[in-house]
Image: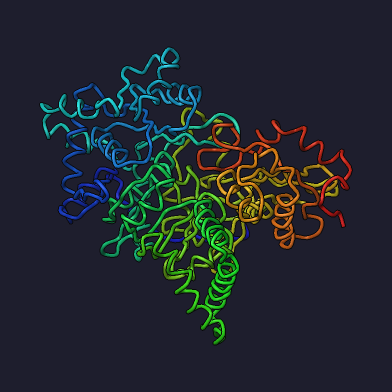
């Protein structure tokens, strides 16, 4: 059926008896005194060895057993990204239980749905605020027997409670699950409809970890490899990396507060990062605005231009002109070295996922000495299905299929995946499961293309393709990503389905806006509503749109835009926890603004039609 298909054989033989707990047991046998974690301690970090971690895991697992948790029981967990997250995760694996992670930003009604649909019998909450949110819906989840709150010392109390449980009982329970059994139930945040529970098996994580470690050998299996996690561990991306790190022996630190990210990077000094593109955009934009405020904006932009040009020439295998070499060496001292130091000075790789990064940022960071390995996957594929390799990476692509994974394109360009990483089913939802598969191929809903070597490029979402009144197919992401890279743009949604031309709704970034305003001789405390109407702000957004329009045909280009005086956040219901836009919600909530784009004559904006 498909014209294009790439399948990479597994490099590690599958073990049908293995489960995730085995990965920790094997790690402890191999390197008991290796630091697997570091936790904040004063201004620095305190190491926790593999053997110490296993002892803590077993002690907590005993507490769960003493509290009546049985193998196969579903346990809800709502918490931020900290060391305790993975401690609880592995303690539940050792007790034979199944974790149901809940985003710590989830509303009471979302928590109610996840707990009731999964059939969870207990919940662990990190803070009193999380506990209060659960209390609101306690009456709607009669199966939940206990709510443990970490802030109240309930994990320590569980450890005390389990002191009498025999080691043999934990060893027995730890071995109950085999590869094909459910390991976790992760609810897709989904940009449409109610979240669906993805049944991910022990084999999904074990086989993917073992094969990915070989594929990403230079990143995770080098002596001294370490990473600082700051994206939510409730998301499959960070969860998979946490498990992979235990298998590969990577030291992991955590920083749940992204406002503290730069100081944490400076003290922890990781060798690789895991991030979403928005983080790389923020690092770049903050550096640019900082340089602008110090009167060095011109130097920074010249340095960025040289960095991108240098990286492009390297990737194309072309000779670098002497002039570029000299400029590059100068800017390395003036600009690049400072940014490297800000990230801790040791970062050589960054794994990026969940949204397209854009070639400009990829090349910029590459010249800083950071190779960004862009990857692609979904909750249903246990995170990565494809990822660029340390030995060969192509900026702008999401890399080739991982070992043990097959990727093909359907006739309409939809990406389909099969292999060791593909989930078992949607929990208690046969209809959705049947609709998601073509044989053993999972239909991702994303559109892509391959190059001759099997490197995949994502071109859009199948459901999000707009068809203008003139019959032109337009993929919004190709326009939205470059616009979102502008410092003052928060989010953007391209519209125009069944309309005469393409237009855009834009929100401003309240974090970056004050600095930009001050750098442009405007009051830094200007409200979002006033900024939305300001001529200089509108001209800057127009500039961002002009850049995006250069990459598409005239029929696909944005002819009009409106700047909204509000922002889209997860709390407002317009973004998913991984910061993807909920297009259907935005189209519904801002229907009047969209309508106005097509009813008010074009001359009312500063966007030329010609």
- Front one among 389 and 483: 483
Point out the image quarter for the N terminus: bottom right
Residue 18 sits above or below residue 339 on the image: above
User: At x 37% / y 41%, what residue is drawn?
Assistant: 81
Residue 105 sits above or below residue 455 on the image: above
* Side (left or right) of 78 relative to 412: left
User: At x 47% / y 53%, what residue is drawn?
Assistant: 385
* Side (left or right) of 405 relative to 532: left
Residue 178 position, x and y percent, is: 29, 40
The reply to whether residue 322 is in sight is yes
Residue 82 position, x and y percent, is: 33, 41
Specify the farthest residue to the bottom. Answer: 322
Specify the farthest residue to the top. Answer: 139
Q: How many marks?
A: 0
* Side (left or right) of 524 relative to 96: right
Point out the image quarter for the C terminus: bottom right
């Amino acid at each position: 059926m498909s014209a294009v298909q790439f399948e990479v054989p597994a490099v590690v033989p599958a073990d049908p008896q293995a489960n995730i707990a085995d990965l920790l047991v094997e790690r402890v046998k191999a390197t008991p005194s290796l630091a697997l974690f570091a936790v904040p301690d004063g201004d620095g970090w305190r190491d926790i060895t593999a053997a110490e971690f296993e002892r803590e895991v077993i002690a907590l697992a005993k507490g769960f057993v003493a509290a009546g948790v049985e193998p196969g029981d579903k346990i809800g967990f709502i918490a931020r990204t900290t060391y305790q997250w993975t401690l609880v995760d592995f303690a539940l694996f050792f007790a034979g239980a199944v974790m149901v992670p809940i985003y710590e930003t989830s509303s009471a009604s979302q928590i109610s749905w996840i707990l009731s649909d999964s059939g969870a019998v207990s919940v662990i909450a990190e803070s009193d605020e999380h506990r209060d949110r659960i209390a609101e819906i306690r009456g709607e989840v009669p199966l939940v027997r206990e709510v443990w709150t970490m802030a109240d010392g309930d994990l320590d109390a569980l450890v005390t409670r389990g002191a009498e449980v025999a080691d043999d009982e934990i060893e027995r329970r730890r071995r109950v699950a085999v590869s094909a059994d459910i390991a976790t139930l992760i609810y897709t945040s989904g940009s449409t409809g109610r979240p669906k529970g993805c049944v991910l098996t022990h084999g999904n994580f074990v086989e993917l970890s073992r094969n990915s470690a070989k594929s990403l050998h230079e990143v995770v299996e080098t002596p001294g490899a370490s990473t600082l996690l700051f994206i939510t561990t409730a998301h499959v991306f960070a969860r998979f990396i946490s498990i992979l790190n235990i298998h590969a022996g990577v030291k992991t630190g955590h920083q749940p507060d992204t406002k503290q990210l730069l100081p944490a990077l400076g003290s922890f000094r990781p060798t690789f990062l895991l991030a979403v593109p928005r983080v790389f955009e923020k690092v770049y934009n903050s550096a640019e605005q900082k340089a602008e405020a110090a009167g060095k904006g011109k130097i920074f932009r010249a340095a960025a231009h040289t960095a991108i040009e240098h990286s492009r020439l390297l990737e194309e295998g072309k000779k670098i002109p002497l002039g570029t070499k000299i400029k590059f060496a100068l800017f390395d001292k003036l600009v690049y070295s400072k940014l490297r130091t800000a990230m801790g000075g040791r970062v050589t790789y960054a794994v990026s996922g969940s949204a397209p990064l854009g070639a400009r940022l990829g090349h910029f960071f590459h010249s800083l000495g950071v190779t960004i390995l862009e990857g692609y996957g979904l909750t249903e594929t246990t995170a990565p299905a494809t990822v660029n390799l340390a030995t060969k990476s192509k900026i702008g692509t999401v890399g080739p299929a991982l070992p043990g994974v097959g990727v093909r394109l359907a006739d309409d360009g939809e990406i389909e995946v099969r292999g060791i990483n593909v989930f078992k089913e949607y929990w208690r939802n046969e209809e959705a499961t049947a609709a998601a598969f073509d044989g053993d191929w999972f239909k991702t809903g994303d559109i892509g293309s391959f190059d001759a070597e099997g490197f995949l490029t994502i071109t859009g979402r199948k459901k999000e393709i707009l068809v203008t009144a003139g019959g032109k197919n337009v993929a919004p992401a190709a326009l939205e990503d470059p616009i979102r890279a502008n410092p003052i743009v928060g989010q953007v949604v391209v519209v125009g389905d069944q309309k005469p031309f393409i237009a855009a709704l834009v929100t401003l970034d309240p974090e970056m806006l004050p600095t930009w305003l001050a750098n442009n001789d405007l009051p830094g405390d200007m409200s979002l509503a006033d900024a939305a109407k300001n001529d200089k702000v509108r001209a800057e957004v127009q500039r961002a749109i002009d850049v995006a329009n250069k990459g598409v045909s005239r029929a696909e280009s944005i002819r009009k835009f409106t700047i909204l005086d509000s922002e889209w956040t997860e709390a407002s219901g317009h973004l998913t926890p991984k910061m993807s836009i909920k297009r259907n919600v935005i189209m519904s909530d801002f229907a009047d603004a969209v309508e106005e784009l097509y009813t008010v004559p074009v001359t009312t904006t500063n966007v030329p039609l010609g």
